[in-house]
Amino acid sequence: MTAEGFFSRVYEVTKLIPFGRVTSYGAIAKYLGTPRSARMVGWALNASHLDDSIPAHRVVNRNGLLSGKHHFKGSNLMQQLLENENIKVENNQVVAFEKYFWDPNIQLIKH
């Protein structure tokens, strides 16, 4: 699969994350059948910032840390977007991460 094809698949999954929920780079990678490519998921989402239809702010690291926040315009934009969805963030980390975690491996039927 090409990088472009992989990125497109990442975007498709990311668009399915419900309002008020978050997932991780690793969960998306695992869903796509490439469990060791969490970093590449991050690269894809970093490249997606020109497309407002991709809610990249809903993807955090496996501990709920806003590890991609520096890729958003403004220092707190990722946090503000999450808080607009009633997800509390403290010290750059989603509070009660398990409560808000959405796992595509459970929620979606694999293609």
Image (cartoon, grey):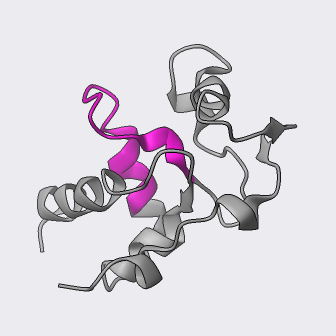
Percent coordinates x, y for residue 22 in the rendering: 56, 55
- Whether residue 87 is in magenta: the answer is no
- In the rendered image, residue 2, in percent from the top left (x then y), is placed at 12, 66
**Image height of 109 relative to 62, above or below:** below
- Residue 94: x %, y % from top left: 75, 48
Q: Quadrant of residue 100?
A: bottom right
Q: Nearer the viewer, residue 109 or 25?
A: 109
Q: Is residue 2 left or right of residue 26?
A: left
Location of residue 28 by image quarter: bottom left
Residue drawn where x is 41% and y is 77% of the image: 107
Q: Position of residue 108 (x, y in %)?
A: 33, 78
- On the question of residue 90 being in view, the answer is yes
Say if the magenta span includes residue 52: yes
Nearer-the-camera pick, 70 or 110: 110
Give the magenta-colored segment's residue range: 41-59
Quarter occupied by the C terminus: bottom left
Q: Residue at x 67, y 30 (%)?
A: 83
Residue 36 visible (yes or no): no
Q: Residue at x 59, y 35 (%)?
A: 85
In the rendered image, which quarter contains the N terminus?
bottom left
Q: Is residue 104 left or right of residue 75?
A: left
